[in-house]
Amino acid sequence: MTISTGSPWRGSMQEPAGRADLDAQRAAESYMLPSVEPVQLIDPDGRHVHNDKYPLPDGDSLLGAYRELVVGRRVNDQANALVRQGRMAVYPSSHGQEACQVAAALCIEAADWLFPTYRDTVAVLARGVDPIQALTLLRGDWHSGYDPYEHNVSIQATPLATQLLHAVGVAHAAKLKGENTVVVAMCGDGATSEGDFHEALNFAAVFHVPVVFFVQNNQYAISVPLSHQSVAPSLAHKAIGYGMPGERVDGNDLAALLAVLGKAVDRARDGGGPALVEAHTYRMQSHTNADDATRYRSDDEVAQWVPKDPVMRMRTYLTELKLLDESTEKDIAAEAERVAAALREGLNAESEVDPEDLFRHVYSEKTSQLREQAAKLREELSREQL
Amino acid sequence: MSTTLTFAKALNTALADEMEADPTVVVFGEDVGTLGGVFRITDGLTKRFGEERCFDTPLAESGIMGMAVGMAMNGLRPVVEMQFDAFAYPAFEQVVSHVAKMPNRTRGKVKLPLVIRIPYAGGIGGVEHHCDSSESYYAHTPGLTVVSPATVPDAYTMLREAIRHPDPVVFLEPKKLYWSKEDLELEALRSSANSFGRAVVAREGTDATLITYGPSVSTALNAAAAAAEEGRSLEVIDVRSIVPFDDATVMASVRKTGRAVVIAEAPGFASVASEIVARVQERCFHSLAAPVLRVTGFDIPYPAPKLEHFHLPSVDRILDAVDELQWEDA
């Protein structure tokens, strides 16, 4: 491996601007500001909305994405049911946010990287990760169940915003190695208050690395509404503070998400540096099955988001354009059922845990202390079996 | 051929040699580029290897640490500098929640071969936040390998070993030793790397064992020299590798001498010194002629420069502890 030469920095950020340059400077700065309204290409009624900056993705792409959307919704519903049946400890559902999940997975290539959070299981599955392996975390067998290098999907992060810095590091290493990798780093609205969010965006901008920060603003951090996290004009506005473009998008509009994320990914791949995308969406269910959302938000508020559902509007749009017919719809529903059945089968099977695993991966080689402790546990277990 | 090097230059040479040997090694942190680090440990590396291999970052320790995690995930071997012990605390979450746990979390799929260099401990008249002995925080975190060299040859070999290590290493540099000098055979050292999990007998003795590491090794050796003049033979163990801990070498010494004092600068309560005492009494109880004692820093925030000499383990305080090891029963 060789590390490519050239400065890791973009260059001087503080060139003094003369009076004649001021207009140019303002133009250079304003490109970093998000659109006045969140970008929307298909409205809640399923109608195309024209946008000069973002053309509508082609029909085949939208149909393929719709397929993932329907499967994702089914995965969320099935996982919730499996928690109720005691087959998983907990499941933070992305019900209502599936368009964000699908777009995050589809906007990048196989060699690119995705950094998901605990709520992003649907995105993880859309990248191709085995569903049972992905749900190992929530079943309680181990802290993660899949090999991150198999699909270039980092383990689902539980602490908030810490994974954004790992994403910057992966992108930085790729850049130094001369690889053309783009990294999509996901977080929620609450995580934008964390210090690591700030540090990750700043590092990404200063080192000019190809990371697309994708904030799913679902309006709540467990019980705390966005108004208590930030009084910025939008979360996307934070981008300009770091010297990168920010964009806001209707997070329930899969077409707009694919267009906006796709553009940010292309720009990053072409050496344009990082970007921040904020998706306006809504967490339709509680934080997890252990939470009770009725304690902090009204049914009326939730009801307002029902007609904005990401699945319905895509179905309407694709059906009216004759891109989706009854037989394709049935085919997609059958596929979703197959995935759900596989989830049930996989998670209903009793999983084996090995107590020796407790010591196996703490270090590449067990320390003498861990060897002693493993032997003690083995001895305890052998006595129990007598 | 013998060369005279300072502890700082030995570290600098180790970094350069490892960067030369392995193109995936990258060095970054605050002021490590053009300036060469506030202690000059990275002096000349940017000039020699380019600013892709040794570079300054924005002033944010969590950012440095988190970026290092990602770089290690993607095939590089980052060596990061935390400018001072207490300035490493903003990176604590990254260290504890990710650096230490990622390999275990992923069942060894993700290895994090990275080194966190931290100048630590006192004795240089530094102001607050520049003199902490923070080793216990790291040693208490499973998944971290925690080492601290106490000699110039060890500074060189242990840093090279840390960079080659497959797991994350917290590399604690006693900053009061940076200017100490020793003659060493650099060529011979280049092929020796066997310090992790291995303590060394820094001075042989028969009457009692002083167990210590990092900045307190030289103090313990001075105490042993003073005790010898009074006819008492003290063995000094330089732990070197706090995690993994070399029980075998330490216990062999205590079983031989039957008496032990553990010495460290950090506050003694719930510390590495406490752990060593516990391990010695669990394993050597029937060889002990006296309770195992400790000479540590007081359980206080690190004192201001004019007061630090009251706080730090001194030769006299070590000799007093040795005197208390129930010699009348011998």
Image (cartoon, rainbow, N blue to C red):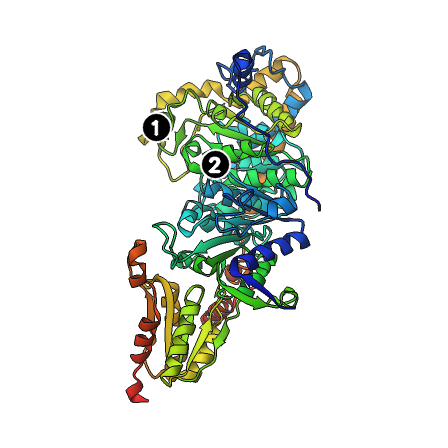
Q: Chain of mark 2?
A: A
Residue at (40% x, 29% y) in the render: A220
Mark 1 belongs to chain: A
| Disc nearest the viewer among 1 and 2 | 2
Judge by depth and name the residue closer to the eye, A295 or B92.
B92
Where is the N terminus of chain B found, in terms of image quarters?
bottom right
Q: Which mark is residue A7?
A: none
x and y percentages locating residue A320 in the rendered image: 62, 13
- The amino acid at mark 1 is His
Residue A100 seen by the camera = yes
Q: Which residue is mark 2?
A: A199
Q: Which residue is mark 1?
A: A228
Closest to the observer, B17 or A152 = B17
| Residue type pointed to by label 2 | Glu
- Give the Cα separation between the discs numbered 1 and 2: 21 Å
Q: Is residue A109 left or right of residue B299?
A: right
Residue B159: horizontal and vertical position, in percent? 56, 59
- Badge 2 crowding class, 10 Å Cα cut-off, few under 14, some 14 to 19, many 20 or more, is many
